[in-house]
Amino acid sequence: MAAPLEGIRVVSLCVGAVMPELTKLMAEYGADVIKIESSITADFMRRVAGDLENSPGWAEANRNKRSFAVNLKSGEGRDLVRRLAADADVMGENYRGDVVDAWGLGYDDIRPINPS
């Protein structure tokens, strides 16, 4: 029997606790979740523990995901996110305010790349 979200690809620019927990549940139900973390500032959950490499909170909230760090302030990093978003079924983010819009990765920027 297939998992309920098998075949769904999720690109996650989610930080902290709440949105990573949501995408963790999606992964547990079979979605292919790709977590993109800023290479400039570590995810909040890593910083809380004071150990950027071995944060139990980060590991729990991001299990069952593929994860890598990207310089989201660089054109190359943003282009990589756009390429991933082009093939995604879901894209989630929870940065403050208009951060992703300033990076050119907001809804209005991604919609033309992936209308569905």
Image: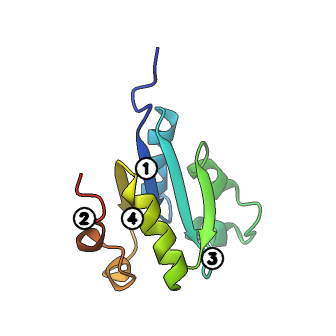
User: Residue placed at 54% from the left, 79% from the top?
Assistant: 76
Residue at the disc numbered 3: 39
Place of residue 63 in the rendered image (x, y in percent of width and height, measured from the top left): 61, 45
Alpha-carbon distance for marks 4 and 2?
Answer: 14 Å
| Amino acid carrying mark 1 in the image | Val
Label 3 and label 2: CA atoms lie apart by: 25 Å
Q: Name the secondary structure under disc 2.
A: loop
32 and 99: which is toward the camera: 32
Q: Which residue is mark 1?
A: 10
- Image location (x, y in percent) of residue 4: 39, 27
Considering only order in the chain, which callout, 1 or 2, is on the residue closer to the N terminus? 1
- Specify which label sits upstream in the sequence, 4 or 2: 4
> Closer to the camera: disc 3 or disc 2?
2
SS of the residue at dot 3?
loop
Answer left or right for 2 relative to 39. left
Q: Earlier in the sequence, mark 4 or mark 1?
A: 1
| Picture disc at residue 93 | 4
> Residue at label 2?
111
- At x 32% / y 80%, what residue is drawn? 101
Real-space Cα separation, disc 2 to disc 1, in angstroms: 15 Å
